Image: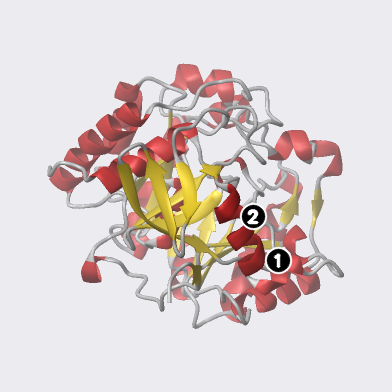
Amino acid sequence: MSQLTEVQRAKFGLLEKGLNISGNARLALEQALDGHDLSSHDFASTSGIILELDRSVWVNAPIYTYNPNFVDSTPYCLEFDNQFYLSNGDFACSASIWMPPSFHKQTEPNLRNYVVTHGDRARLSPIRSCAMKCDFCNIPFEDPIEQYRLKPLDSIRLALDAAVNDAVQPARHLLISGGTPKPKDVDWMRQLYYSILEMYPHIPVDIMMVPVPGLFNLSELAARGLNELSINIELFDQKYAKRWMPNKFHLGLDPYLALIEAASNELGIGRSRSMLMVGLEPMEATLAGVRAIAERGGTPVLSPFRPDPATPLHNFPTPTALAMERVYVSASEIVERYGVALGPACAPCSHNTISFAPEGQSSRYIHPRLRMIGTA
C-alpha cells in the first residue's frame, strides 16, 4: 500500500475538523453561487460543501453554518486570491467547489422534498420519515415517525426529470434511498423501484435499503436494469448496533450478509455494496465488516461518522484523521486480497467516504466533468 499524499491526508483532516471560509473566498462564492446555498445539507453525511482538491481528491467538508457542534477551531481554510485554494499552515493545494443544480433553488414546488443532487448523483427519498430510528441519523428527529407518508409518484417523476435535465448540474446517475417502508408499504416500494427503472432505462439507477422481508426480487431487478444495490450494515459489532440503531439490530446481521452475497451473484461482483460507519465502534469491528462484505463479493464503503446537531449524538466526536488513515490502509489491504475495491466506484460520490476517486477506467462511471466553481 503506497503512502498517502498530503492532499489525501487533507481530506481526512477536513472530515475530522471541518473547514473555515475566508472573507475573500466567501465573497467570491456568493457571486458565483448566485443565490444558491453553499451545501445541500440534507443529511448528516452531506451537510458540508463538496470540494475537489488538486483536481483529484473529493471531499464533503463540514462548515460551521451547518455543523456548529464541532466545526469551530479548524486549521483548514478555503482561501481566494484570483483562484480558490485550501490552506493549513505551510500546506496549500488548489480547490474547486461544486456548483449546485439550478432546481435546488426552485421553491414552488420545492423539488428538494423529493430529490437532492450531490456531485453528479441525484438521490430520491420516496418516503417521508423512516420506519427505523437510528441515533446517528437526522431523519427520525427532523421528520419523526408521526409524519411518515409515501410521496406521490407524479411529484417524484417531476423532481427526477428536473434533476436529470438540469441545465447547470445534470444528474448522471440516480439513487433510490429510504426511509425504510412500513410492512404495509413494501409492495408500494417494490413497484416504485420497477417504475423508476422503467422511466430511466438509459441512466444507471442504484437502490439503497435495508433487507426488508419481501421487498427484493433480485432476478426481476436485474432484468429491469438495476445498476447497484446498497445494503448498509453501518455497524458490524452487534453490541454497538443494539446501542445506536436498535431497530436495525433486531433485523439481525445475517439478512444483510445474505442479501449482499445474493446480489453479488445476481448482479455481478462489485455491484452490491455496503456502508460501514467509522467512529462508532472499534476499528477491529469495522475491519471485520470489511472482510465479511468483501468475501461475499460486495463493495465495502467506509463512511466517517459525522455528528448531526439534530441527533442525540450531536456531541459525539468525529473519528480522527489518523484513525481514518489507518482504517483506510487496513481496509484497502483486505479488499485487495478478495479481488474487490473500496467504494464507491464514482469519483464525485467519494466526497463523503474514506476513499479516493478510482483511477482511469477502473470506474464504471465515466461521466463528463462536473461544473465546478474555480475551474475552467
- Horizontally, residue 297 falls left or right of residue 166, namely left
Instruction: Judge by depth and name the residue closer to the eye, 192 or 80.
Output: 80
| Residue in the image at 57% along x and 67% along y | 99
| Residue in the image at 48% along x and 49% along y | 78
Q: Position of residue 221 (x, y in %)?
A: 49, 67
Could one spot residue 115 in this view of the protein?
A: yes
| Residue in the image at 60% along x and 40% along y | 44
Q: Which residue is mark 1?
A: 104
The image's mark for residue 240 is none
How far separated are the C-alphas under marks 2 and 1?
Answer: 8 Å
Could one spot residue 354 in this view of the protein?
A: no
Mark 1 residue element: helix
Q: Which residue is mark 2?
A: 40
Instruction: Judge by depth and name the residue closer to the eye, 57 or 316.
Output: 57
- Horizontally, residue 340 falls left or right of residue 225, namely left
Q: Position of residue 280 (x, y in %)?
A: 47, 24
- For the residues labelled 2 and 1, say whether their Cβ atoms are less than 8 Å apart: yes
Mark 2 residue element: loop
